[in-house]
Image (cartoon, grey):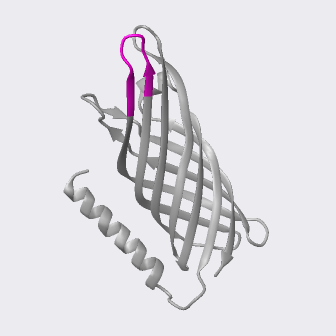
Amino acid sequence: MNRTKVKIVKKLITFLLFSAFFIHVGLAIEIDIGLNYGKLQLKDSALKDIYGDGYVFNTYVRLTPHNFFSIEASYEGGYKKDGLVGIYNENSTLEINGWELCGIFHYRFKQFMPYVKFGYGYYTYKQDIDSDFIRFKVDHHKSTYVVGAGLNIYLIKGFFFIAEVKHVPLKVKPFDIEKDLSGLRYLLGLGFEFEL
């Protein structure tokens, strides 16, 4: 990641931490925990032909120090697909996991709360090709930004249903060739809220 991106990420993290700990000091802070499950749709057609779309889960903790703003820390996992690569159709596995820190802007009215989210993601990607000629294994990580939008629907006291779409641009270059692991996530889930 170049210096400009590092500075932007540092400013974003500083802003999120400042917002979490200094806005409305002394007042109750709402905490949400949730679990989402859904489909990761790869953007790159070549990788999509080999591995295909897959399913991911996303678990998160969200702090709401302000009526219109929250901070979310989350983990995404579950995408691990097998495929055949190369002219000899060699067995291969691709795995993608990541941690995210996002700021969320929302507005709640009655049982509905639409929101948009922007943040920072730290992703690990692994590719293993089982070749008779040479063992090919990649185990790297990459930082990127995250954008998304969603809707919480409040069912009964404390519980809510989640629908979210998230985009993670993830272009990586472990060797000489750049690969595009970018993709959309279509997620559904359930959450629970309480106050401290």
Figure check: 107 above or below 149: below
Position of residue 84 measured from the top left corner of the image (x, y, whole percent): 49, 17
Q: Position of residue 58 (x, y in %)?
A: 58, 51
Residue 70 position, x and y percent, is 52, 72
Picture quarter containing residue 82?
Answer: top right
What residue sits 49% from the left and 27% below the top? 93
Q: Quadrant of the C terminus?
A: bottom right
**Residue at (35% x, 67% y) in the render:** 12
Nearer the observer, 134 or 11: 134
**Where residue 87 appears, x then y in whole percent?**
40, 8
Q: Nearer the viewer, residue 138 or 108?
A: 138
Q: Residue at x 42, y 10 (%)?
A: 132
Please check the rendered image and state whether residue 131 is part of the magenta-colored stretch, yes or no.
yes
Outermost residue on the top side: it is 88
Occupied quadrant, residue 54: top right
Residue 193 horizontal side relative to residue 136, left or right: right
Total marks drawn?
0
User: As displayed, is residue 118 above or below residue 56?
Assistant: below
Range drawn in magenta: 128-138
Check the image and report above or below for 140 versus 104.
above
Question: Does residue 105 appear to the left or right of 191 in the view shown?
Answer: left
Asked if the stretch drawn in magenta spans residue 156, the answer is no
